[in-house]
Amino acid sequence: MGIDFNEGQIIPVDKPYQWTSTKVVRRVKGITKAKRVGHAGTLDPLATGLLIICTGKATKQIEQIQAQEKEYTGTIMLGATTPTYDKEMEPDQLFPWEHITGEMVKQTASAFVGEQMQVPPKYSAVKVEGQRGYAMSRSGKEFELKAKPVLIKEFEITRIDLPQVDFRIVCSKGTYIRSIAFDFGKKLESGGYLFSLTRTRIGNYLLENAVAVKNLIDLLPESEKTNEAV
């Protein structure tokens, strides 16, 4: 007997660069033939790393998994901002960064630890009057997003090679790392945007135990495998 995906499975997947979370869901659904498939927390297309996929009855656990703390690693580029707060779009403003020291970077990171009021990026899935922020932004509409409380438990600087800064962040559900990058640059009297991002943990689920998309076919018993390519 093979795995019953309709009965319910939780599959940690290593989302590839430039794949949408929805594309991963479609891929899992196509392979497993499960009637219901969903993910527990979106990852932006330019981000990589842990995406929890739930099938069948396990989709009832999505909210519970989403609520758990997250861990990310990545790189912030100082000296510029972009409309999307990441490198999806080209920089719209340039700022000096030569005044920034390693000590300033570490002190600024420490200042983020704790409860914060954070404004999400306008290019995000946050809804405003029934519309997604990214859709309104792309159509040129003017709007404001309200700040929301988030908790940043850890903000460790792991490498400084200005204007790039590598980090590890542990945070609550709903925290936008892109907003942290933007606010980080602002606090340093410069600009900042998210250059790269990898989600490494959701609760007790670890990226190191995740399945690569190209290996999803291995979840099936030998009799059900196909030569289907990613």
Image (tube, helix red, strand yellow):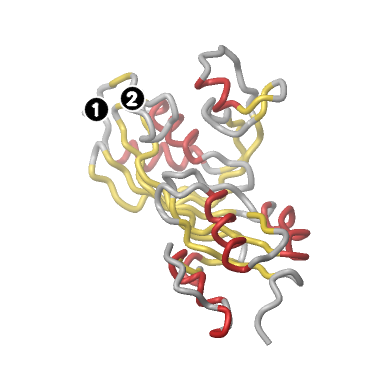
Quadrant of the drawing holding the C terminus: bottom left
Nearer-N-terminus badge (1/2):
1
Identify the element where label 1 is drawn. Answer: loop
Determine whether label 1 and label 2 are within 8 Å by CB. yes
Residue 180: % across, % down:
48, 36
Q: Which residue is mark 1?
A: 99
Q: Nearer the viewer, residue 8 or 110?
A: 8
Quadrant in the rendering for residue 196: top left
Q: Is residue 58 left or right of residue 150?
A: right
Say how many tags the image has: 2
Task: Decide: is 136 above or below 21.
Answer: above
Question: In the figure, 149 relative to 55: above or below?
Answer: above
Q: Amino acid at mark 2?
A: Ser
Residue at image point 47% right, 57% down:
15
Instruction: Say if 157 sits above or below 135 in the image.
Output: below
Q: Amino acid at mark 1?
A: His
Q: Residues within 10 Å of mark 1 (few under 14, many from 20)?
A: few
Q: Quadrant of the N terminus?
A: bottom right
What x and y, as percent, mark residue 207? 49, 65
| Residue 2 in picture, x, y percent from top left | 65, 83
Q: Residue furthest bottom?
A: 1
Q: How far across and down, in percent of the image, does residue 120 sit?
A: 57, 30
Q: What's the CA distance linking mark 1 and mark 2?
A: 9 Å
Left or right: 4 in relation to 92 = right
Residue identifier under label 2: 190
